Image: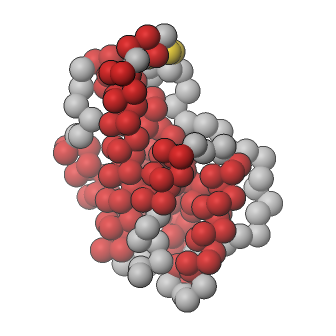
Amino acid sequence: MMTMTAVATAAPAWGDSTEPLYNLVDAAAQRLQTADAVAANKWLTGGPITDPARVKVVLDSVPKDAQSRGVATDYVTTVFTNQINATEAVEYARFAGWKFDPAGAPTSAPDLASSRAVIDGLNRQMVEQIAAQWPVLSSPACRGELDTAKNDVAGQRQFDDLYRTALDSATRSYCGS
């Protein structure tokens, strides 16, 4: 029996990072972590994992935010499409686990509105960080900086293999190639 109360895990006390992509990757990781609470809600309510209307809301809003910050809208749309796909993959994995072990399924979950409010805030943080770190994201140093940030964030958040794979998927287009 599993009770879901947290929507996102609070960031560890590691705010002094000098890594340029750490805050972006950490926001992406926190957004991935919302998948557990969202999946629990959908499991309990019988809701579908995929939600095209919600995806449209996100993919309509983040490019507008990006454009206002001088970031290419097609880049941000790709980044968030990957983020959404990775989050849905975690939700599918949770559903599969609960089907294999019904006793481990959640018995409560936060409502989707509270989870979505957290997600919306993280979306804004991610776009803000993309704009702030655009020189790194568009540079030859991006891949190395991204790998360092992913390893550090995954370690700080104690990610298991599922979440490490999801983080790799969510961030795969950050460096463009």
- In which quarter of the view is residue 60 placed? bottom left
Q: Camera-side residue: 92 or 62? A: 92
Q: Is residue 13 left or right of residue 83?
A: right
- In which quarter of the view is residue 6 placed? top right
- Residue at the image point whose x is 62% and y is 78% from the top: 144
- Residue at the image point whose x is 73% and y is 45% from the top: 12
Q: Is residue 139 left or right of residue 81?
A: right
Q: Camera-side residue: 42 or 76? A: 42
Residue 108 pos. (x, y %): 44, 14
Q: Is residue 152 left or right of residue 133?
A: right
Q: Camera-side residue: 6 or 36? A: 36
- Residue at the image point whose x is 50% and y is 20% from the top: 4
Kindly tell me whether residue 116 is visible in this rendering: no
| 14 in relation to 34, above or below | below
Quarter that holds the C terminus: bottom left
As drawn, the residue found furthest toward the left would be: 52
Kindly tell me whether residue 27 is visible in this rendering: yes
